[in-house]
Amino acid sequence: MGIRSDVLEGLGLSDSVVRIGVTGLSRAGKTVFITSLVANLLERGRMQSLRAAADGRLKAVWLQPQPDDTIPRFDFERYLAALTGPAPHWPDGTRHVSQLRLSLRLESGGLFGGLRGTRTLHLDIVDYPGEWLLDLRLMERDFAQWSAEVLDRIAGRPGADRFTAALAALPRSDAFTEPQAQELADIYTVHLNAAREAGWSDCTPGRFLIPGELAGSPALTFAPLPPDLMDSKLGREFRRRFDAYKSRVVRPFFRDHFARIDRQVVLVDVLGAIHQGPQAVEDMRRAMADILSAFRPGRAGWLGQLLGSRRVERILFAATKADHLHHVQHNRLTAILSSMLREARDRADFQGARTEAMAIAALRATTEETIAQGDEELPAVRGRLLDGRQAAFFAGELPADPSMLLHPARQGAVAWLDQDYAVMNFAPAPLTTRPGDGPPHIRLDRAAEFLIGDRL
């Protein structure tokens, strides 16, 4: 009779593996998060809230060849050079699934730590586009349902007028031509890209934004249609392609990558949505609720069958770019994120997954200062702009009560009533670090403690 692997691991006789998925929506900072996390695990001088690093049990960390030969390697060295080199700049965002393996050599603690000796924990960090995860919502909708939802919320978004005009101009005769389908799909894709750039979150299908090798394929050549076209030849063909997209694009992604995740990081650009306005905040709330429904263990339906008994054990919800705010507002940013995700987060908690919400900056690009505005002194931050100039910046005062933002957002308000929230695009600051220190951050060590502290 064999000995269970978890027993061997507990005795220090077996290596263990934790797979951490990192995702988020566009510009939430996935690449920067992974790069800084890895750099700060390799050089742990700034990781004092990671208890195993602080008490000396984490003896060594090193990069390993990744275990999956068919998945691209996360290009850690190139991204770190971009962030910390002589001309620091933000690296390109995620365009495909990638992976990196770190190995951690640990000295066992506790009463019998001396008997167990050292052990090794492997961290497999999997980076994947949040735009692809948004496609989860498609799996439980048919083409007519998805079309109705898209057309119901499309008004006012960039490129929407051109797309709705193209729909209105379609002939109502029972005809189908491939050039017609391609033109409509192209106009819809232009709208999706413009909406994403303007800060909207719920932009499906996700592969229309990051098509890769599927660009131009029939599986990516469809668009939502109004009810009077559903039974036309165009409607029937688009329905077939929508179903093919779900079965041949979405399902394999979840089967091959998502179903193997142990711990999950969901990065959210809350400040960007607040700046965009109430509709963008509500759009983000809905999108994140749909995304996070994927993490409910034992969920009925196709995803539950796909995952089987496996479940995500811990989920970190992180509001990024906390360095755009003075620290006095960080708790308010965390409270807003917690409230935005409360419904989905409560479901995960109820099902046994541990969750945490926090405001972080994976790479701190600013310093704090106070600026005078009339008779007021405002808690601000100072940083280097993308054009190289230095600027001090006050983003606006976030409300102490998150409902002051979320209530008007859910009620359909088009603008904030008595407040204006601004966003500044800072560049990475030139770094001078001491030996043993990773890049400067805000609460990245706390995020690591939540994600893997129990396994160290």
Image (cartoon, grey):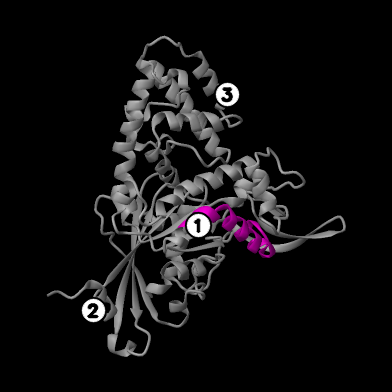
Which mark, by number, is residue 13?
Answer: 2
Residue identifier under label 3: 161
Q: Determine if the magenta segment contains residue 238.
A: no
- Residue occupying the point 76% across, 62% down: 370
Name the N-terminal-most of marks 3 and 2.
2
- From the viewer's side, name the closer residue of 360 and 64: 360
Residue identifier under label 1: 345
Label 2 neighbour load within 10 Å: few <14, some 14-19, many 20+: some
Q: Does dot 1 land on a helix, a strand or a loop?
A: helix
- Residue occupying the point 47% across, 27% down: 188
Label 1 neighbour load within 10 Å: few <14, some 14-19, many 20+: many
Lateral position of residue 162 relative to residue 330, left or right: left
- Residue 270 lies, in percent from the top left, at 59, 51
> Is 202 situated above or below 98?
above
- Specify the quadrant that holds the N terminus: bottom left
Residue stretch in magenta? 323-347
